[in-house]
Image: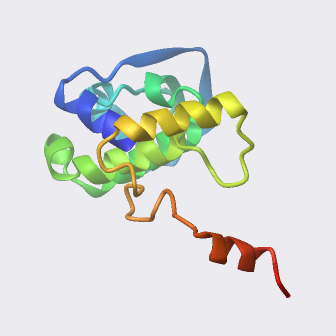
């Protein structure tokens, strides 16, 4: 997800998915101000977040790659990142951190059950994705386990 978002941003083609029903949430004054000040940066990232009132924001579009994630959680995280950096240079200065945050919201989370087709698709994507052996935080995404270790996990021979 992270590598795909980086490539889309480099190509300036972060595809956006409009939401049929905008996701609204109560926002802090800082979140509202950031959303208003960073409209173009958000658009570059494939996000459309607009104020509905002084205390409410609406997420109207998300990056297509992250369409299955929680749009409110994504919006809050991105607005928090944007609030930490100067808006005019945020994409250059915080590109990787911001994309990492966005990718985490679209990634497969712990305890999520995948179908066999989803597992196969994920493995095929990993085969062709650069640096797929670790997440964007540096954690490994897979581990090779030998028969001896596997037997020990299931208490074989004890």
The outermost residue toward the bottom is: 158
| Residue at 37 percent of width and 50 percent of height | 100
Q: Is residue 153 above or below residue 86?
A: below
Q: Position of residue 62 (x, y in %)?
A: 46, 26
Q: Position of residue 71 (x, y in %)?
A: 56, 33
**Depth check: 110 or 87 in front?**
110
Q: Is residue 86 above or below residue 146?
A: above
| Residue at 85 percent of width and 88 percent of height | 158
Structure colour scheme: rainbow
**Depth check: 84 or 105 in front?**
105
| Residue at 34 percent of width and 39 percent of height | 129
* Residue 73 falls in image quadrant: top right
Q: Position of residue 25 (x, y in %)?
A: 61, 36
Dividing the image into 4 quarters, which one contains the N terminus?
top left
Say whether residue 58 is left or right of residue 92.
right
Q: Is residue 70 above or below residue 150?
A: above
**Depth check: 148 or 116 in front?**
148
């Amino acid at each position: 997800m992270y590598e795909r978002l980086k490539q889309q941003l480099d190509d300036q083609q972060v595809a956006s998915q409009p939401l049929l029903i905008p996701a609204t949430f109560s926002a802090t004054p800082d979140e509202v101000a950031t959303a208003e000040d960073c409209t173009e940066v958000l658009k570059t990232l494939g996000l459309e977040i607009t104020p509905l009132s002084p205390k409410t924001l609406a997420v109207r579009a998300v990056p297509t790659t992250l369409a299955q994630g929680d749009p409110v959680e994504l919006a809050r995280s991105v607005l928090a990142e944007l609030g930490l950096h100067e808006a005019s240079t945020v994409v250059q200065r915080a590109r990787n951190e911001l994309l990492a945050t966005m990718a985490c919201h679209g990634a497969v989370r712990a305890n999520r059950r995948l179908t066999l087709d989803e597992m196969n698709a994920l493995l095929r994507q990993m085969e062709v994705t650069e640096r797929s052996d670790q997440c964007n935080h540096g954690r490994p995404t897979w581990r090779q386990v030998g028969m001896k270790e596997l037997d020990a996990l299931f208490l074989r021979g004890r």
